[in-house]
Image (cartoon, rainbow, N blue to C red):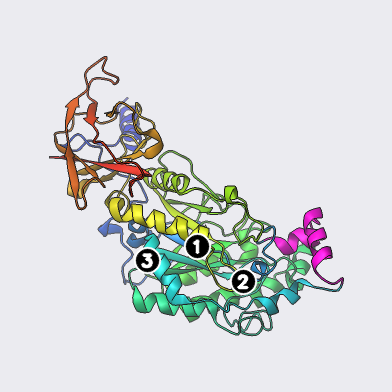
Amino acid sequence: MHSRLAIILFMLSIFYPSMSKSGLPVTKILYHADKSQETSSRPYNFTPTWKSLDSRPLPEWYDKAKIGIKFAWGVFSVPSFHGEWFWYDWKTYKYPDVVSFMRDNYPPNFTYQDFASDFTAQFYNTSEWVDLIEKYGAKYVVFNGKHHEGYTMYPSKYSFGWNSVDVGSGRDLLGELATELRQRRNDIKFGIYHSWYEFYNPLYLLDKKNGFNTSEFVERKTYPELIEAVMSYKPEIIWSDGDWEAEEGYWKSKEFLAWLYNSSPVKNTVVVNDRWGRGTGCKHGGYFNCQDRYNPGVLQPHKWENVLSVDTISWGYRRNALVQDYHTTQELIMQMVMTVSCGGNFLLNIGPTREGMIPPISQERLVQIGMWLRINGDAIYDTIPWTRAQNDYVSPGVWYTYKPRENKLFAILLETNWPKEGQLVLGSVDSKMMKISSVGIYGVLDKGEKLLAWLPCVEGGGCKDGGIIVTLPNIRPNSRNRWGWVLIIHYV
């Protein structure tokens, strides 16, 4: 009997977090960075097993950062049609629009490799890129080191004749941005996207034909290439991809991660995702991507990331994109707020042109998100999820974030859900369990917060007994803060 009671109490402790004196749940989510869990400089001895590798604490900086930017750039940016899978869409899928595009615009003997000479990056200005990264408010950058086409954006000795120095711009495109970013902003982390597989590499195709019982491609190409990138550029994010056709054993993923965590120059600070072989997604690695555009809409027990592109159709630049193909600023801020509220990081992808320009519509989205973050970033950066609720049960357009060390609870009201009557009901905020000292709002005053009137919500007043009703200010149309409003609930 006593043992059964102990088991029940243990299960309750997992699924129902304890309450603090303020009445707010004490966060015990596994991914929440804690000083006691921070990866230190002490020596580790991780073994190439998932049990060992998954025990590594996620470095503290990643959970605090919240906002990242990713650049999908490569030879596919030259045709800039159909997206980053252009080569495969042309030669394997043989999509009619891609086949006709090649037939109508290029000679019969034109190859995909012929595109590389036009990958000039002639307007690639890393200072301008870093300016835009800063304006957006990113705390980490993921730059394409090598996509599935196999072309490296740096002078890899394992990709001789098929890299940005040997053919195309003649420049180390990856290295230039890493250097510029680190010289100007050592608080913004630099990372590398790396595809394990390559569409048509003969070594890979031979291993695939052999049922992945041979590993010539891994041992001679993609594995040492990734080691080379880490040693040369010291990235603090490895954004792994292109793993799904083979098991982790073929890729030697666990061996790589054991080396990365034990011996690499970034062993104490590097973070990785979960794409390390067929079946590893949402199971193994540092933080979880699970799938592209992953946004579960509810709190997750493990740190995760929502990666999506400004272009709803493609990750790479498309010359024929229409304005309606792009996410609006409102849609992107909504995705960002939902993601952070549910414990994730928000990684926004941009597709530059072959010349190295960020398309104006993408620049506009980044600048506008940055404008919003400069006003409301207190509710995004270095926050944790509020385990009591992420989305308010009465006002579904409200999402919560939390800073317990500062006694702040944030209620983020998306513009599309602004109540017409000017009264906002926060049903999830229990004023009986939580001693509220004041409620404010950002973005109304030029600086700081404007205090708002509020009252407890009684039964029959639109919420259960314990919620609160906040009187919102009159807001001028087209406000600089128009995509969403942050209410700050101070408590003692």
Question: Which amino acid type is shown beneath numbered disc 1?
Answer: Lys
Position of the C terminus by quadrant? top left
Viewer-nearest residue: 19 or 229: 229
Question: Which amino acid type is shown beneath numbered disc 2?
Answer: Arg
Q: In this view, does 354 lie above or below 158?
A: above
Element marked by disc 2: loop
* Horizontal arrangement in the rendering, residue 244 relative to residue 140 (left or right): right
> How many angstroms separate mark 2 from mark 3 (CA)?
22 Å
> How many angstroms separate mark 1 from mark 3 (CA)?
14 Å
Instruction: Give the label on residue 354, or none.
Output: 2
Rendered residue at 65%/85% (across/down) = 166
Viewer-nearest residue: 32 or 449: 449
Q: Residue furthest right?
A: 108
Residue 60 sits in quarter: bottom left
Residue 1 sits in quarter: top left
The picture places residue 54, in percent across and down from the top left corner, at 45, 57
Q: In this view, does 224 lie above or below 60?
A: below
Q: Name the residue under label 3.
A: 134
Instruction: Give the label on residue 70, or none.
Output: 1
Rendered residue at 63%/79% (across/down) = 163
Q: Disc 2 or 3, which lies upstream in sequence?
A: 3
The picture places residue 418, in percent across and down from the top left corner, at 35, 33
Element marked by disc 1: strand
The picture places residue 209, in percent across and down from the top left corner, at 79, 63
Magenta range is 85-108
Observer-side mark, 1 or 3, equals 3
